[in-house]
């Protein structure tokens, strides 16, 4: 997507001229006549580059830049200055502006400066992602991800969290859309106590309006008392609408009206209620297909899709699987009082190769199940602890008698086979098994293995 630029100047002729030049060069452009209008837009939208006059009534360019950076710390700024303002422009550079151009600039000078500002922004973002990977910062507020796709999402969260822009989280079931919604809210300036989730697919159609907007006592049969809806409860906070694609068309119209007017009516009431709510929606459906087939309103889609965050499936970020598996191993080892400290290489191989149609949720369930069935004395999670759907087969002597054998029996066979393949070399066998040599000796004695 082409970069979004915001032009700010109190002279309409300058705004319109610059808009024509920059749109012809392929940029998306919005205009504003002062800083207040600009900040209102920045609160709900993402802008890559701010081009603003230094001198403006009410709020000058430097003040605007400072407030814009408080909303989006990654926005770049170019100032337009008269000759008499050069000293102020230099001060702005020291405060973080990219550059300034004098009002007598040429078209080529403008486009060159804009291009360089966008390029610097891109390089900063790439360097931040690279630095995270080099520094091993694979856990971001509890979310695991060393892959490039996840690192880019982490950067996007940093950028959008403090704005009020509506966000649409897309991706397959189980990828963690709800986790990202909570993360965005946590890093925002919204009231941390006001993260209100609602699953649009889990509420009967005749109750959705009441759930979203609330109702007055006596509004319908069974309404024995006044009830606040999710919108009202989320005022000055975040409303998370999971499975937004399941919202009935009739409710989509009312929902869109609330987004546009920032007010609603409880069911059975004629008094409007004003709200300031940040909307995060999530879906595993392709809403563009839903629009084409008449099941989702296009105007609502564009209202929600101000920022789109597509959470990749686990099979597209396989390098994250070992990190996630180790995190879940630690969690469930504590929960089930096991002494599992790591996952051995062979088991990791199977986990990485599996396609994980249920994504992170499925991986978590598989690790929990494997930990549950692992021996209390085991120090590592191994292939034999994994369920058959992951490994695809049961090896060697385990095939015929698997219905009558315990995990200890399996473990004995694997140790015997490993020692046999390595001609009794215990050091090599321990290395292949992923355990310490002393642990192997203990197992040999425990199972009375003859070498």
Image (spheres, rainbow, N blue to C red):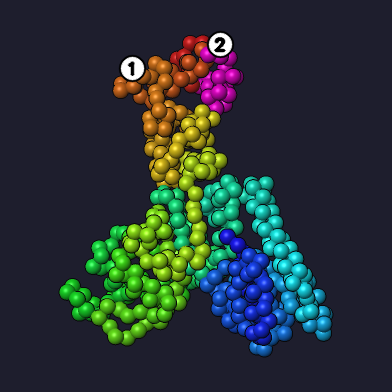
- Kindly identify which residue carries mark 2: 423
Most extreme residue toward the bottom is 57
Viewer-side residue, 308 vs 208: 308
Q: Quadrant of residue 92?
A: bottom right
The location of residue 339, given as percent across then percent down, is 48, 35
Q: Is residue 194 magenta?
A: no
Q: Is residue 227 above or below residue 434?
A: below
Q: Is residue 124 left or right of residue 166?
A: right
Whether residue 66 appears in this view of the structure is no
Residue 317 lies, with reference to residue 67, above or below; the image says above
Report the residue at 28% width, 83% height from top: 269
Nearer mark to the viewer, of 1 and 2:
1
* Position in image of residue 62 (x %, y %): 71, 79
Residue extent of the magenta highlight: 421-442
Q: Earlier in the sequence, mark 1 or mark 2?
A: 1
Q: Residue at x 38, y 32 (%)?
A: 389
Spatial separation of the CA atoms under disc 1 and disc 2: 25 Å
- Residue 450 seen anywhere in this rendered image of the structure: yes
- 156 or 25: nearer the viewer: 25
Q: Residues within 10 Å of mark 2 (few under 14, many from 20)?
A: few
Residue picked out by circle 1: 400
Q: Position of residue 379 (x, y in %)?
A: 50, 31
């Amino acid at each position: 997507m082409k970069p979004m630029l915001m032009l700010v100047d109190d002279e309409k002729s300058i705004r319109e001229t610059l808009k024509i030049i920059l749109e012809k060069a392929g940029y998306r452009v919005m205009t504003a006549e002062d800083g207040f209008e600009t900040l209102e837009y920045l609160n709900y939208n993402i802008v890559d580059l701010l081009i603003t006059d230094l001198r403006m009534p009410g709020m000058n360019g430097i003040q605007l830049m400072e407030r814009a950076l408080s909303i989006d710390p990654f926005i770049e700024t170019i100032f337009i200055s008269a000759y008499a303002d050069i000293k102020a422009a230099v001060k702005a550079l020291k405060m973080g502006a990219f550059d300034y151009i004098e009002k007598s600039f040429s078209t080529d000078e403008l486009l060159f400066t804009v291009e360089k500002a966008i390029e610097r922004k891109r390089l900063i973002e790439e360097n931040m992602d690279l630095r995270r990977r080099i520094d091993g910062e694979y856990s971001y507020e509890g979310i695991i991800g060393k892959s490039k796709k996840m690192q880019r999402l982490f950067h996007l969260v940093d950028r959008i969290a403090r704005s009020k822009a509506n966000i649409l989280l897309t991706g397959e079931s189980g990828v963690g859309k709800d986790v990202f919604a909570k993360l965005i809210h946590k890093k925002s300036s919204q009231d941390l106590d006001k993260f209100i989730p609602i699953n649009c697919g889990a509420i009967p159609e005749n109750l959705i309006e009441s759930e979203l907007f609330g109702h007055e006592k006596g509004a319908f049969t069974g309404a024995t008392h006044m009830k606040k809806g999710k919108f009202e409860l989320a005022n000055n906070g975040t409303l998370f609408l999971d499975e937004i694609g399941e919202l009935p068309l009739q409710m989509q119209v009312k929902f869109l009206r609330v987004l546009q007017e920032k007010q609603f009516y409880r069911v059975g009431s004629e008094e409007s209620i004003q709200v300031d709510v940040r909307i995060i929606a999530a879906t595993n459906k392709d809403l563009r297909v839903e629009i084409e087939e008449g099941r989702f309103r296009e105007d609502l889609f564009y209202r929600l899709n101000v920022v789109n965050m597509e959470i990749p499936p686990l099979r597209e970020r396989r390098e994250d699987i070992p990190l996630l598996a180790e995190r879940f191993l630690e969690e469930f080892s504590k929960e089930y009082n096991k002494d599992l400290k790591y996952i051995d290489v062979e088991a990791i191989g199977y986990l990485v190769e599996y396609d994980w149609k249920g994504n992170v949720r499925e991986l978590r369930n598989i690790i929990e199940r494997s930990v549950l069935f692992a021996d209390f004395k085991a120090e590592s999670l191994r292939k034999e602890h994994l369920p058959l759907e992951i490994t695809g087969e049961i090896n060697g002597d385990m095939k015929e008698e698997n219905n009558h054998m315990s995990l200890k029996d399996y473990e004995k066979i694997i140790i015997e086979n490993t020692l046999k393949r390595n001609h009794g070399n215990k050091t090599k066998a321990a290395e292949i098994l992923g355990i310490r040599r002393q642990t192997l000796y203990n197992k040999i004695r425990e199972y009375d293995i003859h070498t």
